[in-house]
Amino acid sequence: MDEGRDTVRQSAVLASAVIAVVGAFIGSGAAGGTPIQKAAGGALAADATPIAPGGPAFAIWTPIYLGLLAYAIWQSLPAQKADPRQRRLGYPIAASLILNAAWILSIQFGFLAASVPVIVALLAVLVWAFRITRSSPPKNLVETVVADGTVGLYLGWVCVATAANITALLVAVGFTGFGLSADAWSVLIIAIAGLVGAFLAISGRGRLTPTLSLCWGLAWVAVARLTGDLLSTPTAIAAIAAATAVVLLTVFARIRSPKVALP
C-alpha cells in the first residue's frame, strides 16, 4: 500500500510541475497572451503601486522554475520513492505548483481580488514546505540544491510578491490609507517584509536562498522607486534598509550555526 501511495505522490509532483510550467508559459505572454505585468489592467506593473518591484525582478522565476522542475524529476527517481523526507515534502510542493498556476490564471482573467487568497495560500504552503526542510537534513548535495535551495528561493520571492499583490488590490479598490500617506504605508509594508525576512533568517539558521530572493525583490522595489515613473525616496530607503538588515541577520545566524551548510 505504501508503494502505491508513493507512486501517486511522485506522479502528483510531476503532473503539478507540468501544469505550473504551462501556466508560466501562458503568463509570460509567450503563447500570445498578456504578460502578467500587463494583465488585470496593469495592476501588477512596476509603476502601479509603490511596492511593485521593477520588471527585471521577475527574472528570478527562471531559477525557481528550473529548481522546481529539477526537484520534480529528482523526486520521481526510485531512490526517492520511499524516502520519509520526500513523503512529507512532495505534496506541499505539488500544492505550491498548482496554486502558482491558479494565481497566474486568476491574473490573466482579471480576477485581481481572487488572486490575493490564492497567493496567501501559496505563501502558507511554502512556509509548510520550509518547515519540513528545516526539521530534517538533506541526505546529499543534490537534495540540498533541488529541494532545500528551491524551497528557500521560492519562499523568499513569494513573500515579496504577496506584499505587492495585496497592495495592488488595495490600490485597485481605491483604498485611501486611513489618512496616512502612500509613502507611510509603503514604508510600513516594507518593514513588515523585512521582519518576515528576519524571521526566515533566524528560524532557518542563516539559510541563504530565502534571503537572496527576498532581498532581490526588495532591491528591485528600491530601483523602481528611484528610477521609474512612480518615484518614492522614502520607500526606496526603507527597501534598502530592510534588505541590508535581513542580509546582516542571515550572516549572523549562519555564523551562530556553523554546522548548517544549507543554501
Image: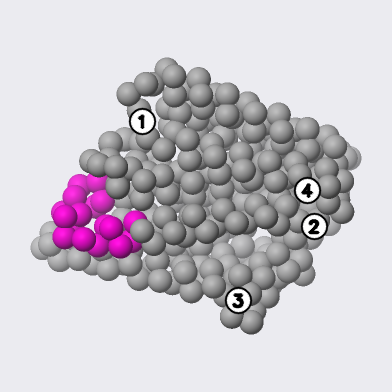
Quadrant including the C terminus: top left
Which sits earlier in the primary sequence, circle 4 or circle 2?
A: 2
Question: Which residue appears at 55% of the width and 24% of the height?
Answer: 249
Number of other residues with Cα within 10 Å of mark 1, as a class: few under 14, some 14 to 19, many 20 or more: few
| Foreground: disc 4 or disc 2 | 4
Residue 8 at x, y percent in the picture = 23, 67
Which sits earlier in the primary sequence, circle 2 or circle 3?
A: 3
Secondary structure type for disc 2? loop
Q: Which kind of residue does numbered mark 1 sit on? A: Ala
Give me the disc on residue 48.
2
Which sits earlier in the primary sequence, circle 3 or circle 1?
A: 3
Left or right, residue 195 beside residue 18: right
Q: Which kind of residue does numbered mark 3 sit on? A: Ala
Alpha carbons under labels 4 and 3: distance apart: 24 Å
Secondary structure type for disc 3? loop
Look at the numbered discs 3 and 1 and tell me whether their residues touch, using CB distance below 8 Å: no
**Residue 259 seen in this snapshot:** yes
* Magenta segment: 71-87
Residue 159 at x, y percent in the picture = 58, 45
Look at the numbered discs 2 and 3 and tell me whether their residues touch, using CB distance below 8 Å: no
Residue ID for mark 1: 261
Alpha carbons under labels 2 and 3: distance apart: 22 Å
**Residue 182 seen in this snapshot:** no
The answer to whether residue 33 is above or below residue 17 is: below
| Foreground: disc 1 or disc 2 | 1
Residue ID for mark 3: 30
Number of other residues with Cα within 10 Å of mark 3, as a class: few under 14, some 14 to 19, many 20 or more: few
Residue ID for mark 4: 224
Look at the numbered discs 4 and 3 and tell me whether their residues touch, using CB distance below 8 Å: no
Residue 121 at x, y percent in the picture = 51, 54
Q: Which kind of residue does numbered mark 2 sit on? A: Ala
